[in-house]
Amino acid sequence: MTQADSIDRSDASRRAVPVIHYKKVKIDGVNVFYREAGPAEAPVLLLLHGFPTSSHMFRNLIPLLADRYRVIAPDYPGYGQSDAPDRSGFDYTFANLADIVDKLTVALEATRYSMYVMDYGAPIGYRLALKHPERVQALIVQNGNAYTEGLAAFWDPIKAYWADRSPAKREALAHLVTLELTKFQYTDGVSDISRISPDNWVVDQALLDRPGNREIQLDLLGDYGSNVPLYPDFQAFFREHRPPTLIVWGKNDIIFPEPGAHPYLRDLPDAELHILDTGHFALEDKLDVIAPLMRDFLDRNL
């Protein structure tokens, strides 16, 4: 093999492996961390994570999309590698988190984007859509609610706290930020747990256990109730703007169960719906299914 052959093969190898950059930008005085990969001029895919994780949940998906798309995956304040400012000086609300993500997209000059929304990422992404419907090119929805049919029994103690903000009702939610529950979210409903990296719950719990973070999470669990009155507005956005939509849903998820997936078709009758035999964090064991579905969907619609 000649030196030229070696250089050619090396160049081809570099092209085949997208480079991921790990960056921070200051938004309203808060350092917001994000992962970014892909060509600067390519269509933007904004990946919005769930609770109790971060952009870490997209670590395996990003390289599979970044050859053709500019992929941006932020950590919300209080999560991952972003700052977790003291709650006395920062509003841990979904409205504020959506504003932070909105300002991040402006700072990164992402004027149009498709969104992957999951869990907490759904109301954050849909709030962005209400503010800037013209910016949303497509949606990928994975176990994220916009309909009351998805608020099942798991939510009963959380709903009780929405109705009664007493210390007792707040403390009743403390188990939701424990290692047991964090691990449960990754493993429940999964047929082959050997496909789930233990790093997930170890990393997530280490960040949840930072001083003051428990109270941040309880604040946000309480504020999730502010999203429910917006569900009709989210649904109106779907009906009026009809963004191309791919729905991939873990049917064994007890937090956002399957009944929350089907109502999307009332307002998005052309949406593509795939119910998968997995749980809450479907990317962990169904990446080999979801990534090809996404590539096909995005290639056809962007």
Image: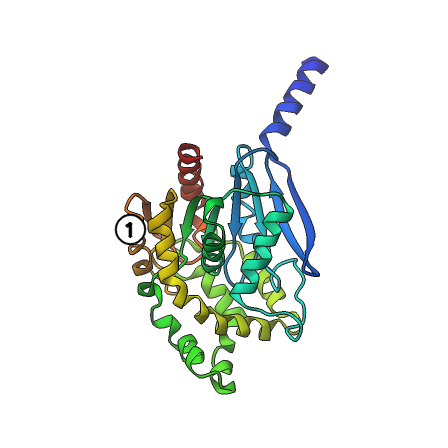
Q: How is the image coloured?
A: rainbow
Q: Position of residue 7 (x, y in %)?
A: 69, 19
Q: How many marks?
A: 1
Residue 146 appears anywhere in the view: no
Q: Position of residue 21 (x, y in %)?
A: 66, 43
- Report whether residue 3 is seen: yes
In the picture of the structure, the residue carrying the numbered disc 1 is 265
What residue is at 37 percent from the left and 49 percent from the top? 248
| Quadrant of image for the C terminus | top left
Amino acid type at mark 1: Leu
Q: Is residue 299 above or below residue 214?
A: above
Say which residue appears at 37% left-offset and 64% top-offset: 254
Q: Which residue is rendered at x = 54% and y = 45% of the image? A: 60
Identify the residue at horizontal 64%, vertical 74% (top origin): 212
- The vertical placement of 298 against 224, above or below, is above
Element under label 1? helix
Q: Nearer the viewer, residue 6 or 228?
A: 228
Q: Position of residue 266 (x, y in %)?
A: 27, 53
| Residue 293 screen position, x and y as percent | 40, 39
Tell me if 11 is positioned left or right of 161 in this view.
Answer: right
Please say if 82 is above or below 224: above
Question: Does residue 98 sit above or below 161 in this rendering?
Answer: above
Quadrant in the picture for the N terminus = top right
Query: In front here: 192 or 56?
Result: 56
Residue nearest the viewer, comparing 171 with 32: 32
Packing grade of label 1 (10 A; few <14, some 14-19, many >=20) is: some
